[in-house]
Amino acid sequence: MNRLITIILVAVSLSHGVVQGVDFESLMTAGNSAYEQGEFEQAIAEYEKILNADGVSTALHYNLGCAYFNQKSYGKAILHFEKARQLSPRDVDVLHNLRFSKLFLKDRFELPESMPLVVWFNEFRQSFSLAELRLWELIMFSILILGIISYRLLQSRSAGRVILIATYIVGILFLLSAGWLGDRILSLEDQRAVLLVKKANVSSAPLVGSGTLFVIHEGTSAEILNTTDSWYEIRLPDGKTGWIMHEAVGIY
């Protein structure tokens, strides 16, 4: 299903490109050709044209991540691998390249080791994309309605009891899928920032000239706590907080 969702997203992007007069497929082909020839800057330019025309797909962000990685722009590589992961959370290539890119980061955080069950649960709840969960919820809802109708028609027969039990089970699965979908939507609303420049000062206040609390380096990711017109308040994995200017980071 993961590959199916990716194909659907690419198809939607391509059809949207026709509406805007942008040939996404040709741009992607040109970008891929430039990438294969080692012309990473040209490949990035072609891929960015698709992004600027609101084209979205796992393949696009993955290719951009690879191109930026080959230019040693690890912050931008991680940004696009993260965006690709949001669209296809179980894509093996995306996950591998994301982990590999983070090996080149300068900042390291010593964090307490989580319980294996907690780690597994957090990974599992993020393992399906928003599109997949919406599709699953629609399927469960359709089966639920079909079960209710079937029970109403056959409740006086022996099959009615079986249908009723099956409908209850589907109803529970539908509620669970709805809760899972809601959790996924909320998690995507919690935006994160990744530093795109070589290093940046994290300030004590959203004001130019305010004191520097600490310095972070390219590729470091942080949770966004608050935002102003020009600043983000961020929290690092080790709990440190501070303010950084918009242009220094990318959002995913």
Image (cartoon, rainbow, N blue to C red):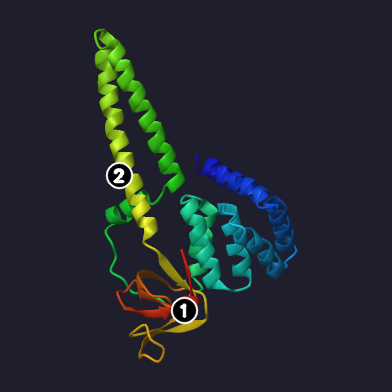
Give the image location of residue 22, x and y in percent.
69, 54
Q: Residues within 10 Å of mark 1 (few under 14, many from 20)?
A: few
Which residue is painted at 69% across and 68% down in the image?
A: 40
Q: Which mark is residue 228?
A: none
Q: Position of residue 66 (x, y in %)?
A: 60, 63
Can you give x and y, in whole percent of width and height, for residue 18 in the image? 67, 48
Of helix, strand and loop, which one carries label 2? helix
Q: Which residue lies under the disc numbered 2?
A: 179
Give the percent coordinates (x, y) of residue 85. 48, 55
Q: In the rendered image of this protein, does residue 214 appear above or below residue 145?
A: below
Q: How many numbered dots are placed on residues in this image?
A: 2
Is mark 2 in CB contact (under 8 Å) with mark 1? no
Residue type, label 1: Lys
Residue 208 higher or lower than 86, as above or below: below
Q: Residue at x 52, y 43 (%)?
A: 5
- Left or right, 46 with respect to 139, comes to right
User: Which residue bears the numbered disc 1?
Assistant: 106
Residue sitting nearer the eye, 80 or 229: 229
Q: CA distance from mark 2 to mark 1?
A: 38 Å
Q: Is residue 112 left or right of residue 208?
A: left
Towards the viewer: 4 or 53: 53
Front position in the image: 110 or 168: 168
Q: Which residue is drawn at the image coordinates 37% and 69% (left, top)?
A: 224
For image coordinates 33% across by 45% down, the residue present is 180
Amino acid identity at mark 2: Gly
Which image quadrant for residue 39? bottom right
Q: Which of the 4 image quadrants contains residue 137?
A: top left
Query: Are there few (<14), some (14-19), or many (20+) residues within 10 Å of tag 2?
Result: few
